[in-house]
Amino acid sequence: MDKAKDDAYFEAKIKKDLAFAIDAIGDLSAEEFNENELVSDAICFRFIQISEEASGLSESYVSSHREVPWKKMRGLRNRIVHDYGRVDLTVVFQTVKNDFPILLSILE
């Protein structure tokens, strides 16, 4: 039986994707990340997933977690999907290094 896609489901998926991205970058430098197409593509895919998952959360869940930039997270998918060739990987790298651990901590 399929698991119900409720707030708990989407929250768990977001946390899993955040953790994956943090672990995948590990100790890479920004330069190594920019040069490693496999890792950068995987991380951009996780950004897309996080955006989709954030869109599945109920308004009551989102309201109870106002410290999370939900609107930015939801809009991220379009930037990556529709403008992929011009995604600034340095910004992606910095977001994962600086913001994802904080976001994961908030959600846990």
Image: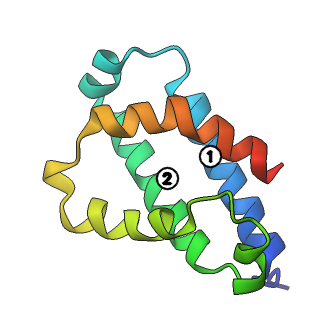
| Amino acid at pointer 2 | Arg
Q: Position of residue 108 (x, y in %)?
A: 84, 48
Relative vertical location of residue 52 with respect to residue 15 in this rendering, above or below:
below
Residue contact between numbered discs 1 and 2, judged by CB atoms under 8 Å: yes
Mark 2 residue crowding within 10 angstroms, few (<14) / some (14–19) / many (20+): many
The residue singled out by tag 2 in the image is 46
Q: Earlier in the sequence, mark 1 or mark 2?
A: 1
Viewer-proximal residue, 40 or 91? Answer: 91
Residue plotted at (56% across, 67% down): 70
Viewer-proximal residue, 56 or 20? Answer: 56
Q: Position of residue 12 (x, y in %)?
A: 77, 60
Relative vertical location of residue 11 with respect to residue 108 in this rendering, above or below:
below
Q: In the rendered view, does 21 fall on the left or right side of 11?
A: left
Residue plotted at (65% across, 35% down): 101
Mark 1 residue crowding within 10 angstroms, few (<14) / some (14–19) / many (20+): many
Instruction: Answer with the quarter of the image where residue 35 lies.
Output: top left
Residue 18 tag number = 1
